[in-house]
Amino acid sequence: MRKKKKKYYTVWKGHHTGIFESWEDCKAQIKDFKGAQYKSFSTFEAAKKALKEDYRLHIGKQKSFTSELSDEQLKKIGKPNPNSISVDAASSGNPGKMEYRGVDTVTKKQLFIQGPFEEATNNIGEFLAIVHGLAFLKQHNSDRIIYTDSKTAMSWVRKKTCNSKLQRTKKNTPVFQLVDRALKWLKENNYTTTIVKWETKAWGEIPADFGRK
């Protein structure tokens, strides 16, 4: 059995800030903390250095990746289309704090970000990210495609519905207001943008990934 690699968690904003040596300890610092900022690192030195720097320098920064697929499989899949944007969501807990964003696939320049929202799910975030991306590209009259790593969110967008079982509460009203706006947009707008599944096994984490856990 492969030994799980040790991780260190930097918390820039939370009930307590600093470096924590387990996900459980990190989670305790960010649970129910509005605007929590955190990320995992593979060494204590990297986590310590990051703590002294601006959180925004590290958000979405990806670790090195080597595909386990064969050369033949990789050739069949090909490479990501550079004329694209990538969207993703992150949720600490399910439900929990959720945020989503869209970036340029090549440069990773952030194009939009929303959240964090209380008491939401990753699927809802992925859905909102795609619709936000569709509206963004239509507004800019762009022919770029959208990459997402969520089949569930792609299905919801295609069916113009949000099949979340999450109950509406006072706490998650803001996120459901966005869901209602997204559904309204889908029903009132036509778009030609192609939504494509990101091939994580071939290319690593999607560029919009928050790179936290």
Image (cartoon, grey):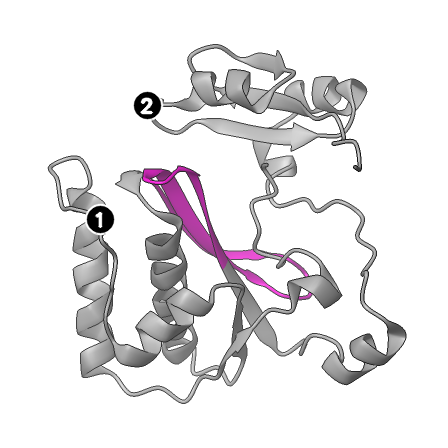
Query: Which segment did they paint magenta?
Result: 88-116
Earlier residue among tags 1 and 2:
2
Residue at 48 percent of width and 82 percent of height: 142
* Quadrant housing residue 76: bottom right
Q: Position of residue 212 (x, y in %)?
A: 58, 37
Q: Position of residue 120 (x, y in %)?
A: 30, 44
Residue at 56 percent of width and 24 percent of height: 23
Establish if 13 lies above or below 97.
above
Q: Secondary structure at mark 1?
A: loop
- The three-letter amino acid code for the residue at tag 2 is Asp
Question: Is residue 68 visible to the viewer in this orientation of the structure?
Answer: yes
**Is 104 or 73 nearer to us in this picture?**
73
- Give the position of the C terminus as an image quadrant: top right
Q: Which mark is residue 70?
A: none
- The three-letter amino acid code for the residue at tag 1 is Leu
In reply to whether residue 70 is colored magenta, the answer given is no
- Give the position of the N terminus as an image quadrant: top right
Density class for disc 1 (Cα within 10 Å; few <14, some 14-19, many ≥20) is some
In reply to whether residue 105 is colored magenta, the answer given is yes
